[in-house]
Image (cartoon, helix red, strand yellow):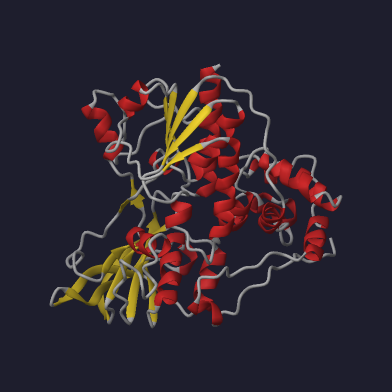
Amino acid sequence: MTTERQRVKEQDKIQRRSNFDAVESNLTPEQVKLEASRCLHCKNPKCVQGCPVNIQIPDFIEAIKNDDLQKAGDIIRQTSMLPSVCGRVCPQERQCEGNCVLGIRGEAVSIGALERYVGDNTKAQKPEIKPTGKKVAIVGSGCAGITAAADLRKAGHEVVVFEALHKLGGVLRYGIPPFRLPRTFLDREISNLKDMGVEFNTNVIVGKSITLKQLQEDGFDAIFICSGAGLPKMMHIKGENLNGVYSANEFLTRVNLMGAGKNDSATPLRVGKKVAVIGGGNVAMDAARTAVRVGFEEVYIMYRRTEKELPARLEEIRHAKEEGIVFKFLHAPVEILDKDGYVDGMKFEKMELGEPDASGRCRPVGTGEYVTEDVDTVIVALGTDPNPIIQRSAQWDGLDLATDKKGYITVDPDTRLTSIPCIFAGGDVAPVGESNAINAMGAGKKAAKAINEMLK
């Protein structure tokens, strides 16, 4: 293999600090052909095995080689209605590209960049739909919900999606910043479902506006709950309730969905000078990079392990560093300092790594040495738990919806069926494996398949 892996062009690292435009552009048509030529078209394509929705990767790349871009798009959309999204936000290095044979001795095929290019430059073909007379309710319009809606609609069922917020897309809309996922492409992917006849209802909180029992009484033959996990995990330390402390969920939602980073916003942020982001995952990177763009002068990511253990994508870490974000490792939060009810610094204990824990990463151990960081804002990005609204509502209605001790809905891992017949769940509210967009899509596909078989 003589052709080098093709690189996308990126916006200047200084310029992009002041805007929310996409950091990465697409490959050029010439680059796409060169990158497609690198695929070996393996007889046993491990890249497909590494994809949670089993996109036939060698086949769509072969279509690119044959100058049939629309065919490539059709192949991808047989299993994924979100190529423009997945090509941008999926952790390809741990999934499809992580299983590419070329990556053993060199660099894997840039599958994500090819998928993104195809998604952006082809149209979804409207399928022929034969109505079955069956009706399915989907709770949530994120990755799992959109995927299930597409598959169930193709099968001929009437599909109605209920979204709690005023805009569609779930975490793709409120969680992922537009410099990673431009809204034009997200809107287009959702429009494709509307064209197929999927009905969307916004501003409907299932468990409040309407209950699961009422959906059953309204004639829905099956329900798929994919409401996400919107309850932020906090640190439970002194000072956490001070003004200037945000969960990453709140911070990103206010900026991405409500325009809080703009001067004329109805719900503006209090932008200080120095912010500490607690955590090391993709959400922490998104929050830190967003903080740069809304005007914080100094942004720190505080992480209790070392850089080697950071769970965020390598691309996200690199972009954060390029944008001037400072990483401080082996720092564990102890206390947020108070001045007149506002953040006035944060105390950390310095850590060292001990023996591996259940995750396989070395456990951070306190050294007894403490430092204070001069910050006026804190963003907590330590993950989320499921909001209990639906679960509690089900109990009040006498529905035995089983959950685990953390409140996640328990499901059969293969079918995503809950403890209640005809009610399924998937995505972050009922996770099986790693929590990310493509795995949520995989859950949506499994649920749709099981629902379809049940309705037959």
Up/down of 61 relative to 414, above or below: below
Residue at the far left: name it. Answer: 340
* Residue 366 on image: x %, y %: 28, 67
How many numbered discs? 0
Q: Image quarter for residue 298?
A: bottom left
Image quadrant where one finds the N terminus: bottom right
* Residue 367 on image: x %, y %: 28, 71
* Residue 427 on image: x %, y %: 45, 41
Q: Image quarter for residue 180?
A: bottom right
Near-viewer residue (171 or 120): 120
Near-viewer residue (401 or 269): 269
Q: Residue at x 51, y 68 (%)?
A: 317
Up/down of 402 relative to 284, above or below: above
* Residue 318 on image: x %, y %: 55, 71
Near-viewer residue (338 or 143): 143
Q: Residue at x 67, y 34 (%)?
A: 127
Q: Residue at x 23, y 68 (%)?
A: 334
| Residue 75 in sight | yes
| Residue 90 in sight | no
Q: Horizontal placement of 156 versus 408: left or right?
A: right
Image quadrant where one finds the C terminus: top right
